[in-house]
Image (cartoon, grey):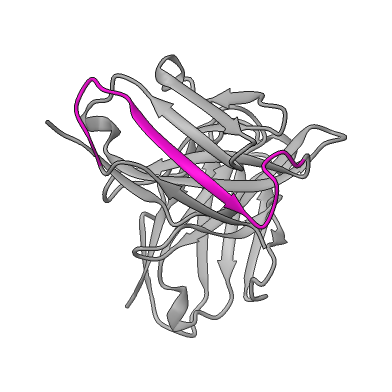
Amino acid sequence: QLQLQESGPGLVKPSETLSLTCSVSGGSISSTKNYWGWIRQPPGKGLEWIGSIYYNGRTDYNPSLQSRLTISLDTSKNQLSLKLSSVTAADTALYNCASGTYYYASGFADAFDIWGQGTMVAVSS
Amino acid sequence: EIVLTQSPGTLSLSPGERATLSCRASQSVSSDWLAWYQQKPGQAPRLLIYGASSRATGIPDRFSGSGSVTDFTLTISRLEPEDFAVYYCQQYGSSPVTFGQGTRLEIK
């Protein structure tokens, strides 16, 4: 059974870069059967899709974050990572990684059915 | 970007009652790729429904999804105490993936 675990610093200073990792167990991050995503949730608010990444490293980003965002895979560690630059207080949120089924033949990515518990990040000086 | 509007914002019902949650899209959801998630306090979202009407693994059959194009519904036939939570719809047929703002289902 696939399991995801996020990690990263709980506090980041304004204008700096937020860096998070998601460790994957129970499956390979290089598998063509899965794809991976990051979703965030500001305190007391709703869900926001940040971006997704596929087995071959292809990415799909939320346009509202694209200019500051990098999502990548580290196959040697079976992890995915998120880097968000020039953060402000508006980036304070619970950050979740998630996985869904990827249909390689059609290139279709299904809903996120496996979620990590999330890691809280506060942006403050 | 497809905007999803959920209604009502809050729904107050009693255990045993039927719950009907709505999700309306600003434009057609490609191939009805619409999902519903349940989120309880301090927990990650849990996938309930995908493809507008398919139940995810392990989801009780009191949960059902329906609808197409721009209008979608999540129905909980008989509410159990553990069903009181926040529910989100999500479209994943086109980029960017978007979520609705959520419906809070509370005990009356």
Q: Which residues are magenta?
A: A11-31
Question: Residue farthest to the right?
Answer: A105
Q: Residue at x 54, y 30 (%)?
A: B2
Q: Quadrant of residue A33?
A: top right
In this view, the residue in front, B46 or A68, is A68
Is residue A48 visible in the rendered structure shown here? no
Q: Is residue B59 above or below residue B28?
A: below
Badge count: 0
Find residue A25 and report its horizontal and vertical position in percent.
61, 55
Find residue A113 and report its horizontal and vertical position in percent.
62, 55
In this view, the residue in front, B2 or A119, is A119
Quarter of the image that includes the N terminus of chain A:
bottom right
Q: Is residue B19 left or right of residue A8?
A: right
Inspect the magenta stretch and tell me whether residue A24 lies in it: yes
Question: Residue farthest to the bottom?
Answer: B16
Q: Residue at x 67, y 42 (%)?
A: A29
Question: Residue farthest to the top?
Answer: A67
Is residue B105 visible in the rendered structure shown here? yes
Find residue B94 and report its horizontal and vertical position in percent.
64, 30
Inspect the magenta stretch and tell me whether residue A27 lies in it: yes
Q: Is residue B68 left or right of residue B41?
A: right
Q: Residue at x 49, y 85 (%)?
A: B16
Question: Residue farthest to the left?
Answer: A125
Q: Quadrant of residue B78?
A: bottom right
Q: Quadrant of residue B104?
A: bottom left
Quarter of the image that includes the C terminus of chain A:
top left
